[in-house]
Amino acid sequence: MTVLGIGVFIVGLLFSIAWHELGHLSTAKLFGIRVPQYMVGFGPTLWSRKKGDTEYGFKAIPLGGYIRMIGMFPPGADGRITKRSSSPWRSMIEDAREASYEELQPGDEDRLFYTRRPWKRVIVMFAGPFMNLILAFLLFLVTMMGFGVQQSLPTVRTVSQCVVPASQASDTCKPDAPASPAAAAGLKPGDTFVSFGGERIHDYQQLQEDIRRSAGQTVPIVVQRDGQQVALSATIRTNVLAKVDANGDPVQGQTVTAGFLGISPTSGVVRLGFDASVSRMSDMARTGVGSLVALPGKIPALWDSVFEGTPRTADSPIGMVGAARVGGEVAALHLPASQRIAFLVNLLAGVNLSLFLFNMLPLLPLDGGHVAGALWESVRRRAAKLFQRPDPGPFDVAKLMPVAYVVATIFIGFTLLVLVADVINPVKIS
């Protein structure tokens, strides 16, 4: 089952790459740009077929894909596109410019990428990541509305017999520990909260928030027990508790002083409605942006996991190999088939969301770098027109290629570090 899970994930990943490149291809053709190649993968070509003026194919290394468009960069200031400098930095610029014209054919003069208006170039470069965003949205909807998500429920699983602060190493009650409000009130495992403090309870997150802000108060509680509603009363104590995020999940290593009742909830799979699904996806997108910003700070821990054998944390960056490995492990778990499928679909949705966020970084050679270049050109031309100055012409993105090579080198180094970590010290699911 592990091999099957890895295989299914790889197929899903290849589809995501092809879907991304289809966004670039379809919009480029829509705007009359010639596209000689549409390839999924890198390295040696395994299979290809030419249709029209585009060669479609698969390559040996399934870690990305590309389309080749004619005229990605404008000619140099002298109108030439061939290499003519011995300077290494200038040579990088001219190599990139020459490569973008190497398949130029008669009649292509009006089918060059750089000759299209900036808004068209923005659409072409944004279309790829946007396709990943669409796919992520659809896959998340399938898991949240179709399969459901694992959630804590407002039903009591266990009742703490005493007040135990989060800083205490164990849940063992000390002789002088006061009884928990839940035990004193007579709450029992299996009780489902109907209301708390006169407010109807809809989910556990709401209940948790109500308990935490009721420190020092005596609160009326109504629970469903054995088919009947039972009225209880509890005096909520103040305690040191684990801090939780907007989704109600614990924040590692952080505590707060808040109200404490002394129960742990049961969990179950709940199907969400459309609005709740969209809201949850918005939270995931914000979390994704935060994770992307925090990525450089996780490199030291990643380095230690490779060279010192330090265990990987749950939020450690993983690459495609690590994600495929997680997919394989999930497929081998003794869980209902629906839950395993839901996890794999959710994992693929997360990969597509990550691809969207990563590709939109305004850095070459990423799509976001080309979008930024086209937007800057539009700003320059509008400013020139406003102040009645000569048209500055196309923005020469090729001049940024030395920076792009530096960025690409950093990305490759980081990717290799993650790859090694995923192989020798992988993130383990629990």
Image (spheres, rainbow, N blue to C red):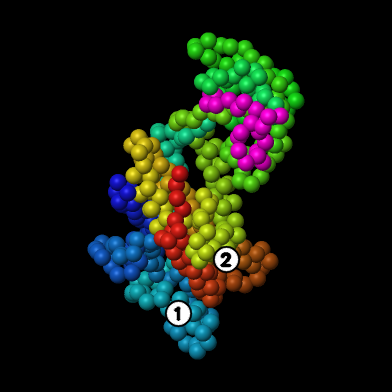
Vertically, is 115 above or below 266?
A: below
Q: Quadrant of residue 423?
A: bottom left
| Identity of the residue drawn at 35% across and 61% down | 62
| Identity of the residue drawn at 44% across and 64% down | 420
| Identity of the residue drawn at 60% across and 40% down | 250
Residue at the limit of the structure toward the bottom, as seen here: 86
Task: Name the kind of residue labelled 2 in the image.
Answer: Glu
Q: Which of the two labelled residues, at mark 2 and mark 1, occupies the earlier sequence position?
A: 1
Per the picture, the main secondary structure of the magenta-coloured stretch is: loop
Residue at mark 2? 377
Q: Quadrant of residue 38?
A: bottom left
Instruction: Point out the image quarter for the C terminus.
Output: top left
Task: Name the kind of residue labelled 1 in the image.
Answer: Asp
Q: Does residue 212 appear in this view? A: no
Question: Dot 2 surroundings within 10 Å: few (below 14), some, or many (20 or more)?
Answer: many
Provide the residue span drawn in magenta: 154-176
Residue 21 position within the rendered picture, expressed as x and y whole percent measured from the top left: 39, 58
Q: Nearer the viewer, residue 65 or 324?
A: 324
Q: Is residue 159 magenta?
A: yes
Assign a secondary structure to mark 1: helix
Question: Dot 1 surroundings within 10 Å: few (below 14), some, or many (20 or more)?
Answer: some
Residue 185 position within the rendered picture, expressed as x and y whole percent measured from the top left: 65, 18
Q: Quadrant of residue 159?
A: top right
Residue 215 position within the rendered picture, expressed as x and y whole percent measured from the top left: 73, 28
Task: Count every numbered label the image shows and give the total.
Answer: 2
Q: Is residue 263 magenta?
A: no
Assign a secondary structure to mark 2: helix
| Identity of the residue drawn at 60% across and 60% down | 297
Q: Residue 95: which disc?
A: 1
